[in-house]
């Protein structure tokens, strides 16, 4: 007789498996029934563990966490608030650097709950009971309590030590004096982080991240790079795992776009895509999307071509490795705006030389133009010849044959990187909560198509915050982009005092 997950919680089912005599004629069937019920709970955990072994054979079915049917949680009353964060964390909304009416970094947190520490491996708890058999108290997740896996804590809305339905005992010392109190609660279907994904798949590609469905997706995408090849499809899968931003999963029609104030939902006949409410939707109702098409502009994958539109990009800074010029020591900036083209004259070989504005150190700019012209001579097509506007050019171009203006950024993207570069546009503020984010990019470069790479444009949110130095106070503005470097590039070598950078997680 086959067992299903629901069978383990059904003592009558086990009673029938013993035979008709036990199920029908035995006088103390209740006792046997309860014994089988208790045994079934143990068998159910064995069933869950056995299924994990089976599911872990494939990266598609592998569970992220181990499920534990029951866990006995005991805690002392004296340990109350040990699991709480006593100081505000960096990144909490509404905080600032100065002591005003709003909470500030480092202030004591006003706790509206009762916090206790839990095992560090616990990620979530489905429900909490006061006893296994016939419970009289059931606590609901995110209503009566909340699990905080980062702080390894559980926060109760009401103190369980004050609830008469919670089993409690006195703790006495050797002299018989009551020194503490202890309670027992049962965690039902708690999720435990045993590093399943890393231990079975992530270790092989040397990628460790915090256990999550996003980490599982990312590692799966890296395996796809190794098995089916470094395709654009596999790159999109990796980006979805990194950011939680979904691309279209099929060729389908957008039916509805719904905003409920907190989320934006894009509904098709086959899928429902959910994003934060701060994303910019780039599809319309009734529009057909194909596999891999972006639905929002939080993550975009662009393959540069001469026809690509680059509105919204300030420019790009490229180092010598990207330019394939080893003698260029520091990055050069190519602006996304029209700049004058300068006709320098003829070189000793009688070849026309033209240049346009590139920002950087003088030595690197001069080296760049010298090597660019030398490469043109080797390829028998100098930059002047590339820019020649004549229909049937004969001889070297003259100043009137060269365009008056050029866009350095668009020229570089169309000529240097066409067909061997991905441009990734990313907006971290719109990523899904819990997604690994930009840290995953360092793992991707080795799995790209040969002779290709990617440039990353990260949009930073603009804002103003404050910092204090002694008794004075200055304003620091964080801009979305850095202005191109012109004649003041030498300032980069000067000491302007403290440097403020955005850091992940907590201020320490």
Image (tube, rainbow, N blue to C red):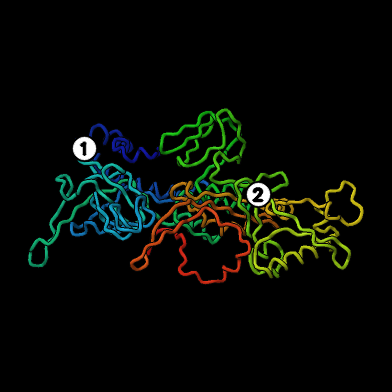
The residue depicted at 54 percent of the width and 71 percent of the height is: 494
The residue depicted at 49 percent of the width and 59 percent of the height is: 208
Say which residue label 1 marks: 30
Label 2 residue SS? loop
In the foreground, 67 or 103: 103
Instruction: Look at the picture and state if 291 lies above or below 169.
Output: above
Q: Earlier in the sequence, mark 2 or mark 1?
A: 1
Distance between mark 2 and mark 1 Cα atoms: 62 Å
398 lies left or right of 492: right
Q: Nearer the viewer, mark 2 or mark 1?
A: 2
Q: Residues within 10 Å of mark 1 (few under 14, many from 20)?
A: some
121 lies left or right of 285: left
In the foreground, 155 or 478: 478
Label 1 residue SS? helix
- Looking at the image, the residue that sits furthest to the right is 394
Q: Residues within 10 Å of mark 2 (few under 14, many from 20)?
A: some
Count of picture labels: 2
Q: Quadrant of residue 471?
A: bottom left
Question: Can residue 58 be seen from the camera position used here?
Answer: no
Say which residue label 2 marks: 231
Quadrant in the picture for the N terminus: top left
In the foreground, 134 or 96: 96
In the foreground, 119 or 144: 144
Residue 52 in the image, given as x and y percentages of width and height: 44, 49
Residue 205 in the image, given as x and y percentages of width and height: 56, 59
Res. 71 mark: none
The residue depicted at 36 percent of the width and 65 percent of the height is: 472
345 lies left or right of 216: right
């Amino acid at each position: 007789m086959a067992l299903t997950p629901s069978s383990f919680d059904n003592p009558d089912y086990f009673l029938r498996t013993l035979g008709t005599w036990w199920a029908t004629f035995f006088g103390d069937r209740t006792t046997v029934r309860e014994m089988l019920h208790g045994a079934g709970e143990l068998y159910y955990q064995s069933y869950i563990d056995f299924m994990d072994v089976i599911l872990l054979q494939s990266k598609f079915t592998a569970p992220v966490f181990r499920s534990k049917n029951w866990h006995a949680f005991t805690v002392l009353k004296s340990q109350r608030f040990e699991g709480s964060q006593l100081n505000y964390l960096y990144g909490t909304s509404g905080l600032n650097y100065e002591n005003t009416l709003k909470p500030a970094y480092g202030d004591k947190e006003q706790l509206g709950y009762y916090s206790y520490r839990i095992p560090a491996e616990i990620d979530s708890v489905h429900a909490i009971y006061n006893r296994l058999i016939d419970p009289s108290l059931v606590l609901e997740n995110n209503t009566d309590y909340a699990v905080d896996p980062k702080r390894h804590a559980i926060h109760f809305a009401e103190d369980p030590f004050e609830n008469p339905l919670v089993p409690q005992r006195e703790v006495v010392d050797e002299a018989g004096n009551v020194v503490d109190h202890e309670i027992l609660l049962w965690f039902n279907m708690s999720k435990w982080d045993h590093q399943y994904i890393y231990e079975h798949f992530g270790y092989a590609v040397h990628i460790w991240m915090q256990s999550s469905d996003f980490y599982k997706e990312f590692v799966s995408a890296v395996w796809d790079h190794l098995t089916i090849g470094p395709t654009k499809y596999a790159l999109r899968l990796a980006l979805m795992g990194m950011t939680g931003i979904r691309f279209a999963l099929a060729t389908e029609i957008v039916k509805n776009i719904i905003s409920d104030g907190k989320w934006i939902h894009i509904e098709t006949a086959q899928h429902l895509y959910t994003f934060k409410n701060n994303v910019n939707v780039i599809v319309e109702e009734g529009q057909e999307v194909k596999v891999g098409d972006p639905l929002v502009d939080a993550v975009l994958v662009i393959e540069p071509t001469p026809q690509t539109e680059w509105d919204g990009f300030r420019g790009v800074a490229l180092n010598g490795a990207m330019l394939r010029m080893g003698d260029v020591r520091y990055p050069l900036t190519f602006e996304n705006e029209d700049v004058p083209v300068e006709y320098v004259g003829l070189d000793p070989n009688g070849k026309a030389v033209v240049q346009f504005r590139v920002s950087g150190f003088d030595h690197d700019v001069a080296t760049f133009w010298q090597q660019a012209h030398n490469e043109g001579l080797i390829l028998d097509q100098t930059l002047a010849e590339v820019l020649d506007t004549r229909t049937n050019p004969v001889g070297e171009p003259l100043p009137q044959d060269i365009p008056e203006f050029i866009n350095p950024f668009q020229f570089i993207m169309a000529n240097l990187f066409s067909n061997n570069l991905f441009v990734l546009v990313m907006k971290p503020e719109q990523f899904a909560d819990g997604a690994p984010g930009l840290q995953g990019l360092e793992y991707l470069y080795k799995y790209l198509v040969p002779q290709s790479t990617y440039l990353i444009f990260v949009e930073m949110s603009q804002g103003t915050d404050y910092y204090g130095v002694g008794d004075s106070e200055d304003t620091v503005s964080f801009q979305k982009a850095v202005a191109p470097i012109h004649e003041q590039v030498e300032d980069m070598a000067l000491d302007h005092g403290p440097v403020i950078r955005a850091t992940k997680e907590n201020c320490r």
